[in-house]
Image (cartoon, rainbow, N blue to C red):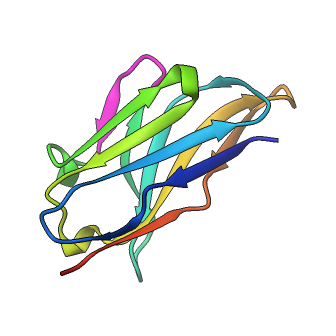
Amino acid sequence: QVQLVESGGGLVQPGGSLRLSCAASGSIFSINAMGWYRQAPGKERELVAAITSGGSKNYADSLKGQFTISRDNAKNTVYLQMNSLKPEDTAVYYCNAPIYDSDYEWSDYWGQGTQFTVSS
C-alpha cells in the first residue's frame, strides 16, 4: 500500500519559519503532481501549493512569495518552506498526490495531516 507521511509541524512564533516534509512510500510506480493543502478551524480545506514531477509550481495567490514548494523525485518527497508566518497560517496541513500504484491505476492519496500553530 501507499502512504504519505507528513512531518514538521509544531508551534512557531509570528514571523518565524517552518519547513514541512511529506514522504510517499509503498508500491509506487509513478507520482504526478504533489501538493499541500491546509484546513483551518471552521474553514474548508484549501490548496496551498502544488508541484509537478517536472518542477512546475502553482501557489495560492495569497501565499505567493511567502511559501515555497519543492520536491525530491528520487525520494518521493515534497517540501513546503514557510516564511513570515502569521497566526492566520495556523491550520492542519495535508500532503496530497495522485499516485500510480500496484493496482495499476491512479489513486488520490492524502497524508494524515500535520498541525502547526503560529502564536506568541
Tell me, yes or no, whether the highlighted magenta stretch contains residue 103.
Answer: no
| Vertical position of residue 106 compared to residue 87: above or below | above
Residue at the outermost top position = 54
Q: Residue at horizontal 43%, vertical 16%? A: 54
Q: Nearer the viewer, residue 13 or 82?
A: 13
Q: Is residue 22 above or below residue 9?
A: above
Measured as percent of width and height from the top left, residue 32 is found at: 57, 27
- Main secondary structure along the magenta-highlighted residues: loop
The N terminus lies in which quarter of the figure?
Answer: top right
In the image: residue 71, left or right of residue 113: left
Give the x, y percent position of residue 20.
40, 50
Q: Quadrant of the C terminus?
A: bottom left
- Residue 23 percent across, percent down from the top left: 57, 40
The quadrant where residue 93 appears: bottom left
Examine the image and state in which quarter residue 51 appears. Answer: top left
Q: Residue at x 62, y 36 (%)?
A: 98
Q: Which residues are magenta?
A: 52-59
**Vertically, is 22 above or below 14?**
above
